[in-house]
Amino acid sequence: MLILDDNMEKEIVKSVVEMSAYVFERGLVSGKAGNVSARFKTESGDIVAITPTLKSLADLNEEDIVLVNEKGELLTKGKPSSEVGMHLAIYREKPDVYGIAHTHSPYATGFAFSNKRIKRLEGFGAIKSEYLKDIEYFKPGSKELAEAAAESLKTEDAIILKNHGVIATGETVKEAAALVEFVEEIAKTQFVTHVLNSIE
Ligand SMILES: [Zn+2]
């Protein structure tokens, strides 16, 4: 029998609902795209609270959030996001990460579909390389994507998934959501800069 810390569980689920609405309101996801999760510790192991599949992040309820253990086994009813494997792989590789947000925000995803890369700006911690790291395309929901993203995020807090979108990690789900928003903002700024520079 699994013993959950009720208050902790409620708080985490609430933060996933709030940050899902946040990324939707900020225009970082649309339709039923994107997924958000948070992890919490219990005596019987880590639990991940994640958004459900095939539902808009706009107006989720706390009952919509799906709980899974580290192995991905369902602890509640409902069906988790198709990217649950990617979230779990990242949590496995990054013990200090407690929140993840994945979006298809338009400007950053535009870069992801182009041959242009997003320049790093202050705000990404130590700037180790000039551009935001990206990983090659793998089918959404695949094991290959989960492994490649987790590997790449070992040394990064945000990466671009080529021909797909953005994923970011944080010590909290709020931090992860703030980071996907920041990536979108710098992508937008760079796009505007490119356009303005091209005008005679
Ligand atoms: Zn996606």
Image (spheres, rainbow, N blue to C red):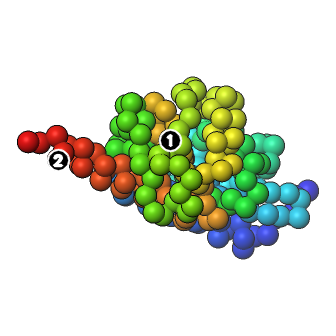
Residue 140 image offset from top left, x and y in percent: 56, 30
Residue at horizontal 69 percent and vertical 48 percent from the top: 154
Residue at horizontal 37 percent and vertical 31 percent from the top: 114
Residue at horizontal 53 percent and vertical 38 percent from the top: 134
Callout 1: CB less than 8 Å from ligand 1: no
Dot 1 corresponds to which residue? 160
| Apparent side of residue 199 relative to residue 187 in the rendered image (left or right) | left
Residue at horizontal 57 percent and vertical 40 percent from the top: 53
- Which element type, helix, strand or loop, lies under badge 1? strand
Between 131 and 46, the one lying in front of the other is 131
Determine the residue located farthest toward the bottom in the rendered image. Answer: 7
State the mark number for residue 196.
2
State the mark number for residue 41.
none
109 vs 76: above or below: above
Residue 66 image offset from top left, x and y in percent: 66, 50
Q: Residue 71, located in which quarter of the rendered image?
A: top right
* Residue 52 in view in this figure: yes
> Given the image, on which type of amino acid does mark 1 rest?
Ile
Disc on the earlier residue, 1 or 2: 1
134 vs 13: above or below: above
184 vs 125: above or below: above
Between 152 and 23, the one lying in front of the other is 152
- Which element type, helix, strand or loop, lies under badge 2? helix
Determine the residue located farthest toward the right in the rendered image. Answer: 1
> Given the image, on which type of amino acid does mark 2 rest?
Leu
Between 6 and 196, the one lying in front of the other is 196
| Apparent side of residue 190 relative to residue 147 in the rendered image (left or right) | left
